């Protein structure tokens, strides 16, 4: 939800930017879009659809997440010339590093879970298990690899919903903002971009 | 008249194509960030 908020707020700003300059929103030429569609499938099955996400064993969920994110990494490398691609790719690489280092799921500490879900019933989450249907696995800080890349930040309590997010998620949100900002800008032209500041 | 109709349909076709590309790019970005990001919300806990 917080990442979607970055895309939608970025789109609103891009539309305003385009309107101010009398332009239309620009659709950048992305290559191999099918990779994103293909990468989304295992994640929808393992995490998105409650009916299947509840049935899938933790090992298969981990396999689905890692294989899906490797496809997404391939996609962003193939589209590295797009605005924000480096931030999107770096954020994904940080998340993927934490995920691979911790057995295929994003680590989250019990302390963060307790702050995220203060009203959860006792026994509704357990150390070493997935956090609900999320991509997270609950691990004590002592057992966690690369703990600084884990889901460790929480939204301010004034937000209408809560989420724990990682440094990689922050970079992905910034990359999405930069990508959408560029959609409201002029068409990329290497010659003119060299001489005219935008 | 025929020229006008063909010009209109050409413009409409281009507009359509541009909108389809725009929607495809936005959908790809949304799918990418949903797949690349890993925020924890606790969905399904206790459910």
Image: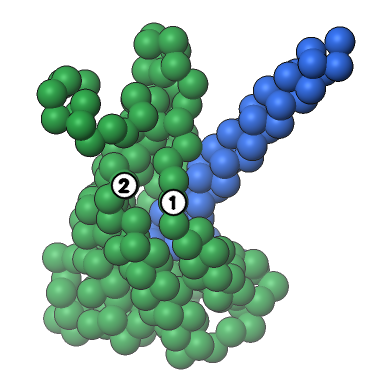
Chain colours: A green, B blue
Q: Which mark is residue A108?
A: none
- Decide which of A164, A184 is in the foreground and name it: A184
Q: Spot the residue most to the right.
A: B1
Residue A87 appears at what percent x and percent y? 23, 51
Q: Is residue A95 above or below residue A56?
A: above
Residue A120 in view, yes or no: no
The image quadrant of residue A66 is bottom left
Q: CA distance from mark 2 to mark 1?
A: 8 Å
Do callouts 2 and 1 point to residues on the same chain? yes
| Apparent side of residue A197 relative to residue A100 in the rendered image (left or right) | left
Q: Are marks 2 and 1 in contact (CB under 8 Å)?
A: yes
Q: Which residue is mark 2?
A: A82
Residue ID at (22%, 59%): A90
**Residue at left 48%, top 80%?**
A64
Query: In front: A185, or A170?
Result: A185
Above or below, A150 against A141 in this view is above
**Chain of the residue under label 2:** A
Counting from the top left corner in percent of width and height, residue A54 is at 61, 77
User: What residue is shown at x 31% (from left), y 47% (from top)?
Assistant: A82
Q: Is residue A9 left or right of residue A146?
A: right
Residue A189 appears in which quarter of the rendering?
A: top left
User: Which mark is drawn over residue A30?
Assistant: 1
Instruction: Name which of mark 2 and mark 1 comes first in the sequence.
Output: 1
Q: Residue at x 37, y 75 (%)?
A: A70
């Amino acid at each position: 939800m917080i990442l979607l908020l970055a895309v939608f707020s970025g789109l609103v700003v891009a539309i305003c930017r385009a309107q101010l300059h009398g332009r239309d929103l620009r659709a950048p030429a992305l290559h191999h879009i099918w990779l994103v569609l293909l990468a989304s499938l295992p994640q929808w099955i393992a995490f998105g659809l409650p009916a299947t996400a509840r049935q899938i064993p933790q090992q298969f969920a981990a396999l689905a997440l890692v294989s899906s994110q490797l496809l997404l990494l391939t996609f962003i490398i193939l589209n590295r010339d797009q605005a924000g691609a480096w931030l999107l790719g770096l954020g994904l690489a940080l998340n993927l590093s934490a995920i691979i280092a911790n057995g295929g799921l994003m680590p989250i500490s019990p302390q963060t879970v307790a702050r995220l879900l203060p009203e959860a019933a006792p026994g509704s989450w357990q150390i070493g298990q997935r956090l609900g249907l999320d991509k997270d696995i609950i691990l004590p800080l002592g057992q966690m690899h690369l703990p600084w890349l884990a889901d460790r930040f929480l939204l301010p309590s004034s937000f209408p919903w809560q989420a724990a997010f990682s440094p990689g998620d922050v970079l992905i949100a910034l990359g999405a903002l930069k990508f959408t900002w560029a959609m409201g800008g002029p068409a990329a032209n290497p010659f003119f971009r060299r001489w005219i500041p935008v | 008249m025929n020229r006008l109709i063909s010009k209109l349909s050409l413009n409409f076709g281009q507009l359509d194509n541009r909108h389809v590309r725009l929607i495809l790019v936005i959908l790809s970005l949304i799918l990418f960030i949903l797949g690349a990001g890993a925020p924890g919300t606790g969905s399904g806990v206790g459910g």
